[in-house]
Amino acid sequence: MSILIDKNTKVLVQGITGKEGGRAAEDMLAYGTAVIGGTSPGKGGAREKNNLPVFNSVAEAMAAYPDIGASMIAVPAPFVFDAAMEAIASRIPLIVILSEKVPVSHVAKIIAHAKLNGVRIVGPSSIGIISPGRAKIGSVGAAGIADRIFSPGTVGVISKSGGMTAELSRILTDAGIGQSTAIGIGGDLLIGTDFVDAALLFEQDKDTKALAIFGEIGGTYEEQLADAIRQKKITKPVVALIAGQFSEQLATGAVLGHAGAIVMKGAGSFTSKIKALREAGAIVAETPEDIPVHLQQLLGKTI
Amino acid sequence: MNLLEYQGKELLKKYAIPVPDSFLMYPESFLPDLSIPFFLKSQVAAGDRNKYGGIVQVESAADFISAKEKLFKTPIAGLKPDVLLAEKKIGYTGELYLSFSYDTRTRAPALSLARQGGSGVAEACVFPIDIVTGLQDFFIRDALLSAGLPLHAELKGIIQKLWRLFESEHALVAEINPLFATGETGYIAGDAKIILDDYHANPEYRPFIDLPGDIAIIASGGGASMLNIDALMHAGGKPANYAEYSGNPPASVVEELTVRILTKPGLKGCWVIGGTANFTDIYETMLGFVAGLRKISPKPDFPIVIRRDGPRREEAFQMLQEVASREGYTFSLFGPEVPMAYTAEYLVKKIYEHSDR
């Protein structure tokens, strides 16, 4: 089992004739994802490089494939707002935004409209979602190395960082621990699916036995996960790794790696996150390599 | 991008929010045309300037010179000012707190208000804004009533104007603290803390922070780069910078970054670090690193530790080995067989041996 995507999820690619969109589509097809085509306004009717149909609009694609289950957005940042609103208007249930550097004011509006329309946003700045051995959406695990990094199994991976989604999964795979689904939620200040949202899905997935998460300083998403664990909304074991301890030596307000990593007035600091997670009963790992060690101790041979 | 107080106040003025009369002061500036006493304020991007001696009340013309000289020499949170703000002293009856920012709990913008502003603002009331509805007058009235503040037209007007600034300028934070209440119904901004959305202001923006150490770092990916600076510091290394690239950049981007970080004097080592990449072309990015390295003069003879994994790693490492032996660089190459943190320890040990010789 897996969350969010499987072999049967029909995926649309918004921006399929672009460099990023085309490459991701090719990779997703190679992995076995049911990519049905993509959009590129003005290029409708053509076939793109993978011989997939190109539509002028999401509505046109929906007319041809009414059961599209997910859309991947890989368009330049200034066009993301329009692309996301278009997918929301067609009520595509899962919208994964890969584009980086989307203005926060746009993201806030996208999230509000998605909520009103009952659809889920993952990202922006998401590396994508992969259910190993089944399907993937996004740039996660390029063809040729995906099988070395990801393997099917019972640990759910949730990461703010795309690179660490792969690094953690590879470390788990090397330790003989497979993943049910690995999801890059993005490191922006505002994100459509946070740790709690993703963890709640894993909580419902009967094949996921534990969660491995990668968090960073800034924002309150890690603290909110701690709250959800304390309130018993999340009961599966959580092993977390948090980056950015060094920032406690910098002036407040410094913006680090990800746009969400603004450290302000103590809230969202490394210490605050570690403390909240430990007190809630999560295990905080010191290094990526400690994560499989903790998981093996927690779950023994049931992994 | 954190605006300095005077830059923030220029924005407030643009949106017709009252600010005190003021002048920018440089080391060579003469006494400003303000009635004495007035304030001299250090223009650095740090909080609690008052606590660290960054705000001085000038009591006389003679006072001005010594206060000015002292402020230019006084670091606050490690930062010395390039400019001071000389500002009229405002008589006030109350100090309020007012801000707009994004709340990661509601994932929406929020209005924050407190009756007691100033540097010790304890708890502000936070009111999440429904961005589909926008900021309506009824919302502001309700917020003012909940926070125990008066329903003055001037105050409501300032809140509306600050919201327009927040939206139109694509700010992440727009804070006035304190907002002075003067007399019956007047209000004037005592300070301005405004952070603009870098990605809106400059889509080419890449995070870069100068740090006081001696190990240059080129990290790949925002998350791994933070994790790795933590690892380097745990290993006893001192990072010289925070810099990263993400995604799958062309060689030229990595080349430019390499030149930028390696031109810093006094470096003792360089760490090129990243996890297992999803789709970053390792060969392409390492070509960029080598191109940048070749531009550094004198030629770096310090240890360079590279730990990378991802598409085209084997080709990249073969190329790097050839460059090292042909051009005489000291590269230590690692793949996924060793943890990222191990290569931090390795580099720190190597630097120690290197400088010991």
Image (cartoon, coloured by chain):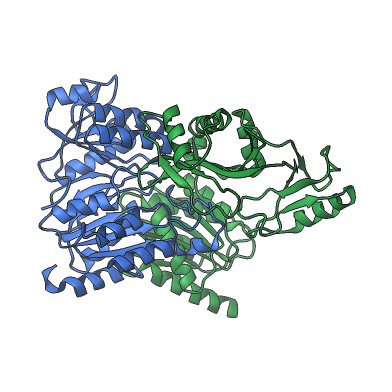
Chain colours: A blue, B green
Q: Position of residue A167 (x, y in %)?
A: 30, 60
The front one of B317 and B247 is B247
Is residue A141 visible to the viewer in this orientation of the structure? Answer: no
Residue A229 is drawn in which quadrant?
A: bottom left
Residue at image x 25%, y 73%? A293
Residue at image coords 43%, 65%: A271
Viewer-proximal residue, A167 or A118? A118
Residue name at image x 14 percent, y 53 percent: A204
Depicted A31 relative to depicted A64: above or below: below
Total marks in image = 0
Residue A155 visible here: yes
Q: Position of residue B315 (x, y in %)?
A: 35, 56
The C terminus of chain A lies in quadrant:
bottom left
- Is B97 left, or right, of A280 in this rendering? right
Image height of A80 relative to B31, above or below? above
Image vertical order of residue B337 relative to residue A189, above or below: below
The residue positioned 86% from the left and 52% from the top of the image is B63
* Extreme residue toward the right, this view: B62
* Residue B2 sits in quarter: top right
The reply, left or right, for residue B284 in relation to residue A15 is right
| x then y, percent, for residue B209 | 55, 54
Residue B254, position as x, y percentages in the image:
48, 50
Q: Is residue B317 above or below residue B64?
A: below
Tell whether A136 sits left or right of A192: left
